Image: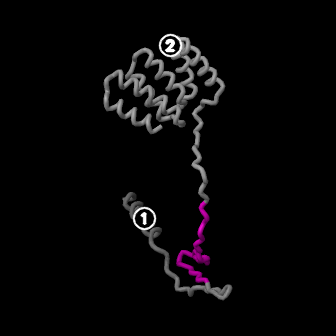
Amino acid sequence: MMKKITVIAGLLLLAGCTTAPEKSTKPTNQTPTNNSQKKVTQPSSGVKITPYEQKEIKRQSVPVVVPQQKVQQKFNDGSQLPAFKTLMQKTQVAYKQQQLAEAERYALQAQRIAPQATETYLYLAMIADQRKEYANAEALARRGLSYAQSNAMKKQLWLIILKASEARGHTIKTQEARRTIQTL
């Protein structure tokens, strides 16, 4: 019995809280300012709503500045770091002396420092080419192309791709490499 009374009292209390407040029939206040009138409405909740005056949005033409030269943006690939430069110098010396294992070790260390530097891919591709690992040489050269910014670097990488595809007997890739080299 006590539970029923509690439930009924709870429902009545809940129903009383959820009913909408009474609507008042107060007239809206209007205050004139600057020869225009703002409408101030006061809904039944007691919150005043005052609209803001908006100025007209005017379109204006903006002058477009076009640079005379096409500026090539160079992204920071890490090739300016002193440690990278030192390792690449060691790589070049070792490669010229035909110490391929040592050159590869230095190039891989440089690549860890600057993973987007094209020079590391170039030397790793040249080392793979010297070892007659043509598939690896081509893959490294193509990866280096994705980071290459200068036409000279692109040409060197395409020459490695050309040599590797000729050695593997891929005529389509050889033709692609020749065409690209001619355009560079």
* Residue 100 appears left or right of 6: right
Question: Are the two marked residues, 2 and 1, in contact with CB atoms closer than 8 angstroms?
Answer: no
Report x, y in % for residue 56: 59, 77
* Quarter placement of the N terminus: bottom left
Location of residue 60 (image quadrant)? bottom right
Q: Which residue type carries mark 1? A: Ala
**Residue position marked by numbered label 2 in the rendering:** 100
19 or 45: nearer the eye? 45
Numbered mark located on residue 9 in the image:
1
Q: Alpha-carbon neighbours of circle 2 within 10 Å: few (<14), some, or many (≥20)? A: many
Magenta range is 38-64
Looking at the image, which residue is at 54% across and 24% down?
A: 112
37 or 22: nearer the eye? 37
Residue 55 forms part of the magenta stretch? yes
Q: Would you say residue 6 is visible in this rendering?
A: yes
Q: Nearer the viewer, mark 2 or mark 1?
A: 2
Dot 2 lies on which element? helix
